[in-house]
Each structure stands twice: as structure tokens, then as C-alpha cells.
Amino acid sequence: MFPRPFDYQAPDSLGEALTLLAADPDETKALAGGHSLLPLMKLRLVAPRLLVDLRRLRDELAGVRGADGGLTIGALTTYHTLQADPLVVERCPVLGQVAGAIGDLQVRNRGTIGGSLAHADPAGDLPAVALALDAELEAASQQGRRRIPARDFFQGLYTTALAPGELLTAIHVPGAAARTGAAYAKFRNPASGYAVVGVAALLGLDEGGRIAAARVAVTGVGEVAYRATAAESALVGQTPTAEALAAAAAHAADGVDPLEDLYASGPYRAHLTRLYAGRALTAALERARG
Amino acid sequence: MKLPINVTVNGTPQTHEVEPRLLLVHYLRDVLGLTGTHVGCDTSQCGACTVLLDGAAVKSCTVLAVQADGGSVTTIEGLAEGERLHPLQEGFWERHGLQCGYCTPGMIMTAVDLLRQHPDPTEAQIRDGLEGVLCRCTGYQHIVAAVQDAAQRLKAQ
């Protein structure tokens, strides 16, 4: 019902936050919106000794900026901000659409993109979107800063490439080439709203209308969001007919042992993965042509 | 560890020493005696605990009191101005938007934020905006009608 006792700090600077996070990293957690962390702490599934609240770092770590035709998004940017930000709407509409559908109105006022990506929930929407967009995740630690490609970031169940004491600070979304479209299609668990299966797809067409770039990213199915590389290979170079998309989508669950739970069996999840990959690809194609 | 927090609640500055693990909902209910905000689950799903924090609807069971330090909170008790009900309270009265009333403060506080974002909401926007508050009694029909009624009242003001 309520967490075990813990110490709490709300540092005024990123440097101070990094010092606090590095001191005893196994017993320390960063607090952003808290809507993944605090529910776990209330159930006592997680019991850090120290919470480092990032709330005083919003000036530095929240907000959306244009960068080289793409976006730089501060890790503390809330879903509420993302869904309506004009730069997001213009340069990466799928991100705003997904952010606007996460949780509910109250959750979107607090939840942050950085918190979601760092938490790496196996059924979270944003990891799949980050993979499909080929985003780069910027992290800071006492050792300095680095950028981690999304495809290297999500490593396992609630496990990312962030090192102990390292903090996700920004998400870099590359500018979309012409004739590129991205979409997300999801089968929601009717109670929790989480993805039983969620697929983010991006298609880029060349001047002749053939597929030059294809990314298909799946969440809710494995222990971690993954790129469906078999589906992607089946798309590149193809003329994007309905048959070609369907044939590629049929590979969206290749090489993955789907999660089984009360709501969906493994084979059912695999079936949904193929189905929703088809839907995401169809929607992405429409946007690439539009 | 106990930490001092300063929070303005329903317009009144409050100062207390609290444990970091004290949830905002328990601060409001147990320390301040504002029991209009309700605890209805332990999974952050039901929304009965919804209040406004710096103007935004939040689930106060999923916010630590220390996270509200320096901020301002409005609870259901803070909506009426003396005897004058807020248009949402009027709407819930006129359109019978409640039965047991347990979710009602959460519904109303969420709807305050919803109507701020969408002053002329469609029915779909109302239902989407209230997804984070669960009601076991009403089937939501009269709640939607109450919010529509309130939207009309606010536009007429």
C-alpha cells in the first residue's frame, strides 16, 4: 500500500544528481514522473534506499527542440507535452499519437518519455517507437555523456544499456527523409491498456515508389522490445503492394519466444504480432505516400 | 528521515514535516483532514484520488507529498467558492452524475483539467479524458452528461 522507508533528495543540478546516483547505484533510483516506479514501490516489489527526484532539473532536461530536421527531446518531457508539441506533430507525428494514448489523462500529466524508456517495460509502447524511429538515447554520468542507438539500448527484461549511476537525459529522433511514414498499431489489454502486442513500423520509399527503408519494432511479445529484422529484410527493395506487406508481416514474430500470460497464449500472441505488423505497415505506407 | 514541505492547498499555505514515503493522498487525508480525496485501489488505476497539482490532474496516490513541495494543490473541497458550487458540481447535481459518490471527487477533478484542455469537448473526448477514473455504479452515462452540462455552464459564464 505504501513504500518501505527511503531517503529522498531533490538536487538542483544535473551534476549533483549524477553524484547522488553514482554513490550507491544498486540502492538508488532516479524519480521522474514516478508512474512506473512508485506503483512498484507501493507493492514493495522495489525498495531503493534513496530516491533522487529530478523535478528541479526540468529546465535542463524537459522540452522539445528541433535539431537537423529531427528532434531533441528532453528525458523529463511529459506525454502531455509530447502529444501537443507542434514540432512533434510536424516532424514525428507517430510519437505524439502514441504519447497521447498512453495510460490516461492523469498519467500523461506526470509520465515522461525518459522514464518510460529507462524503465523498459516489456509491454511499454515507447520502446517500440524508439526502435522504429532509430532514435539515439543520450545518457550522462560522472564519466561524461554518450549516445546509445535504440537498437543497442533495450537489452532484456526491465534492462537497458544504462550503466550504474547513468541517467538518460535526452532522446534524439533523426529527421524523416521525404516519402517516409511511421505508424503504431496496438492490441490493448482491456484492463491495463498495456500492449498485449504493439508494433511500430516505419517505411521510406525511393523516387520509384519502392521500399528503401523499413523498420518493424515489436513490444509486448518478448521480454524486451525488438526489431523484427526478418520482416524488415523482406520489405527492403520491394514494391509496396498489399501482398508484399502481408508477406513481410508474416515474419514479425520470427525467432521470438512469445510471452504467455493470463490474457494471451504464446501462439495467440505470435498471431497478433503478425496481424498488427500488417496493420502498422499499411498505415505507415499510407503516410509515406501521403 | 523527515523533510519539511510547503504546499498551498486550496489556497491555504501549509507547512509540515513528512516522511518521503508519505503519499500525497495520505498527506491530504490524514495530515490535513481533507477526506474528500479517496483511496480506491493500490494499482494507480482507479483515479478516485485525483487532485490538481499546479493545475494538472494527477493521481495523488502516485505522487509523494515531497514531490508537491513548493506547489499548489486543489482538492474537491477547494472547488466551491463559499456557497457557490463549481459548474462541475452543479452538473453532477443536475444530471445525477453519481450514486455512491466514491469516484466522484476523482471524476470532477479530472474533468476540471479535461475542460481546461477542451472547453467544448465531444462525447468521445469526455470519455477519453475520464479513462483514468473508474466508476462501479453508474455505467458512466450520467457522468458524461454531467460533464457536458458543466461545459455548457462554463461557456455561458
Image (spheres, rainbow, N blue to C red):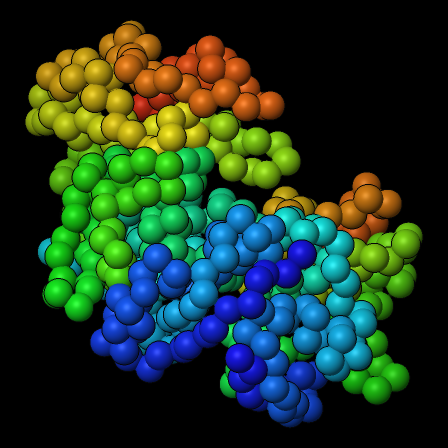
Q: Nearer the viewer, residue A157 or B96?
A: A157
Left or right of residue A227, residue B151 in this image: right
Q: Residue at x 61, y 86 (%)?
A: B17
Q: Residue at x 89, y 63 (%)?
A: B93
Is residue A161 at all visible to an observer of this figure? yes
Q: Nearer the viewer, residue A169 or A216?
A: A169
- Whether A252 is drawn above or below B98: the answer is above
- Whether A103 is drawn above or below B6: the answer is above
Task: Give coordinates of residue A210: x percent, y percent.
Answer: 13, 19
Count of numbered badges drawn on the protein: 0
Q: Nearer the viewer, residue A27 or B94?
A: A27
Q: Nearer the viewer, residue A23 or B40?
A: A23
**Image quadrant occupied by the C terminus of chain B:** bottom right
- Whether A45 is drawn above or below A278: the answer is below
Is residue A69 at all visible to an observer of this figure? no
Task: Give coordinates of residue A99: x percent, y percent.
Answer: 42, 49
Q: Residue at x 52, y 15 (%)?
A: A265
Task: Give coordinates of residue A233: x percent, y percent.
Answer: 16, 17
Left or right of residue B106, residue A82 in this image: left
Task: Give coordinates of residue B103: x percent, y percent.
Answer: 78, 56
